[in-house]
Image (tube, rainbow, N blue to C red):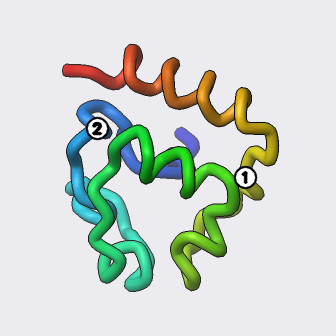
Amino acid sequence: MPMPSGPNLNGLFGRQSGTTPGYSYSAANKNRAVIWEEKTLYDYLLNPKKYIPGTKMVFPGLKKPQDRADLIAYLKESTSQ
C-alpha cells in the first residue's frame, strides 16, 4: 500500500502546522507553528517553500489568486469535522 504524500487534512482549519499525529514533518514546518486559516493558506499556497523555508513539501504553489481561493474553499468544505 503506498504511503500518503502528506498528513491527513481532516480538521485542517484552526490546526497548527506540524502537529498531525502519525506524519513525519520537517523541523521547519513544526517550528513555523502557523495556524491554518484562510489567510495563512492563501499565502502558503502561493509558494510553500518561500512561506516555510526548509519544508519538505514538493508542491510548487498556485500563482493565480482565484486558483488559491478555489482550493481553500474546497478544503474548508471537505476537511471540516
Q: Secondary structure at mark 2?
A: loop
Q: Is residue 34 above or below residue 71?
A: below
Q: Residue at x 80, y 38 (%)?
A: 64
Which residue sits furthest top?
77
Instruction: List x then y, in percent, for residue 54.
Output: 56, 84
Q: Which residue is mark 1?
A: 61
If you read the primary sequence from the N terminus, does the residue marked by circle 2 or circle 1 appear first? 2
The alpha-carbon separation of the residues under discs 2 and 1 comes to 19 Å
Residue at 22% x, 49% y is 15
Could you tell me the amino acid type at mark 1? Gly
- Mark 2 residue type: Phe
Q: x, y percentage for residue 14?
A: 21, 43
Residue carrying label 2: 13
The picture places residue 10, in percent across and down from the top left corner, at 30, 31
Residue 33 as seen in the image, left or right of residue 28: left
Q: Is residue 49 left or right of residue 10?
A: right
